[in-house]
């Protein structure tokens, strides 16, 4: 397995062109997304190699790349390398500005997508036309415009952003049984990760960043909040505590290296489709990592009717971001399971199972309910 000799990361890496050696062999060059060091794995291609790793200097400016490659490529390839080089230089800028790795990855995806669909990133009008022809929602186009605006600001390009307006839609909220069915279809590590999302309402990056030291009994501390959210502590169930304790402790992180989250996302989408097909429930394909956060907030507000508590649990600094969940509570009575208890011990078991107390009848029977 290829790994970066500078920081030890095992990927993902950018493919950074080919190196033609004097012996006639060809070596694939890579650029580490973690530390941005360039290296080549001589074991990848070529008839005779010693298998050693070579560390190259990080690329500070793009024109060095252009000079080195122009003589080896045709005009079209030179333009592609120039575009790639400028994107990499822009990613260096984001890193120096303190942008988070996921922000860098999001910007990289947008710029590569625009370039792939025919946009010349150095010609704003070309980018504007490409964005207009994209078959995506206006909210996605707003994201594209925001990314390219920062890009043009760095390279000092004249740019008048088009005026797209995102239409805010209510998020999809699945039934709890659907979430449990989806979680049960995955193996132990991913199932535990999904259960963590369900019980904490954390963003996927926040949950993936959890370390073993963040778990204290049944209390989880989120110390790596995203999107300028607040750190917070949340209580989890004994079921989740048991699932976490069953995981191997190979790293300080509970679920694995930060760079492997993108790989998990792709595997999650493929497995989710297979589970939806097996259970004949296409609604499962609409469940994403962020759906668990919406589900958590909706259920919490339906139980407490306390929007400030929901804001605190989600880590929102603005109440406006939390208010959207007050519009989602429209549950019908047939969406609940009901249960009764005559003893205090029975009532305690129902509460621990997630049932909410409703009332006590004249026959001293306590009624409970839980959303399906």
Image (tube, rainbow, N blue to C red):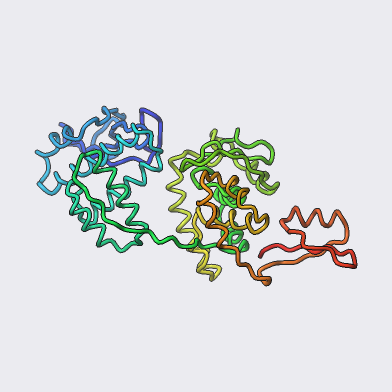
Q: Is residue 211 left or right of residue 362?
A: left
In which quadrant of the rendered view does residue 23 lie? top left
Quadrant housing the C terminus: bottom right
Front one among 270 and 212: 212
Q: Is residue 224 above or below residue 353?
A: above
Q: Is residue 105 above or below residue 284?
A: above
In which quadrant of the rendered view does residue 38 lie? top left
Front one among 291 and 311: 311
Q: Is residue 347 left or right of residue 140?
A: right
Q: What percent of the width, then of the height, locates residue 349? A: 79, 54
Q: What percent of the width, then of the height, locates residue 348? A: 81, 53
Instruction: Write the residue at 26% across / 57% down.
Output: 131
Q: Is residue 120 left or right of residue 335?
A: left
Residue furthest to the right in view is 363
Instruction: Write the residue at 59% across / 54% down.
Output: 296
Q: Is residue 162 left or right of residue 253?
A: left
In which quadrant of the rendered view does residue 12 lie? top left
Q: What percent of the width, then of the height, locates residue 198? A: 59, 52
Instruction: Write the residue at 49% across / 62% down.
Output: 170
Quadrant housing the N terminus: top left
Q: What percent of the width, then of the height, locates residue 257? A: 47, 38
Instruction: Write the residue at 12% across / 34% down.
Output: 67
Front one among 124 and 200: 124
Front one among 151 and 329: 329
Q: What is the tally of numbered marks visible in this picture?
A: 0
């Amino acid at each position: 397995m290829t790994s970066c000799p500078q920081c030890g990361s095992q990927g993902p890496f950018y493919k950074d062109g080919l190196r033609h050696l004097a012996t006639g062999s060809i070596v694939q060059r890579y650029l580490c997304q973690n530390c941005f060091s360039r290296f080549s794995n001589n074991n990848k291609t070529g008839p005779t190699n010693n298998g050693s790793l070579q560390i190259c200097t990080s690329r500070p400016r793009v024109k060095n790349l252009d000079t080195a490659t122009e003589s080896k490529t045709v005009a079209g390839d030179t333009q592609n390398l120039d575009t790639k080089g400028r994107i990499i230089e822009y990613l260096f800028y984001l890193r120096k500005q303190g942008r988070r790795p996921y922000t860098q990855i999001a910007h990289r995806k947008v710029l590569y997508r625009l370039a792939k669909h025919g946009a010349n990133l150095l010609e704003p009008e070309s980018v504007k036309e490409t964005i207009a022809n994209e078959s995506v929602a206006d909210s996605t186009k707003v994201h594209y415009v925001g990314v390219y605006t920062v890009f043009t600001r760095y390279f000092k390009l004249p740019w008048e952003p088009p005026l797209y307006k995102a239409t805010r839609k209510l998020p999809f909220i699945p039934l709890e049984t659907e979430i449990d069915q989806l979680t049960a279809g995955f193996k132990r590590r991913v199932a535990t990760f999904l259960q963590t999302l369900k019980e904490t309402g954390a963003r996927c990056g926040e949950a993936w960043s959890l370390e073993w030291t963040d778990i204290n009994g049944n209390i989880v501390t989120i110390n790596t909040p995203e999107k300028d959210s607040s750190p917070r502590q949340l209580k989890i169930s004994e079921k989740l505590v048991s699932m976490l304790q069953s995981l191997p402790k190979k790293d300080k992180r509970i679920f694995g290296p930060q760079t492997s989250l993108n790989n998990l996302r792709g595997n999650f989408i493929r497995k989710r489709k297979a589970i939806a097909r097996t259970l004949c429930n296409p609604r499962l394909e609409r469940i994403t990592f962020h759906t668990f956060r919406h589900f958590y907030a909706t259920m919490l507000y339906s139980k407490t009717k306390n929007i400030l508590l929901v804001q605190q649990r989600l880590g929102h600094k603005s109440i406006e971001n939390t208010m959207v969940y007050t519009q989602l509570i429209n549950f019908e009575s047939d969406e609940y399971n009901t249960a009764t208890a005559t003893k205090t011990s029975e009532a305690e078991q129902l509460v621990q199972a997630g049932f909410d107390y409703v009332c006590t009848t004249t026959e001293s029977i306590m009624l409970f309910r839980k959303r399906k």
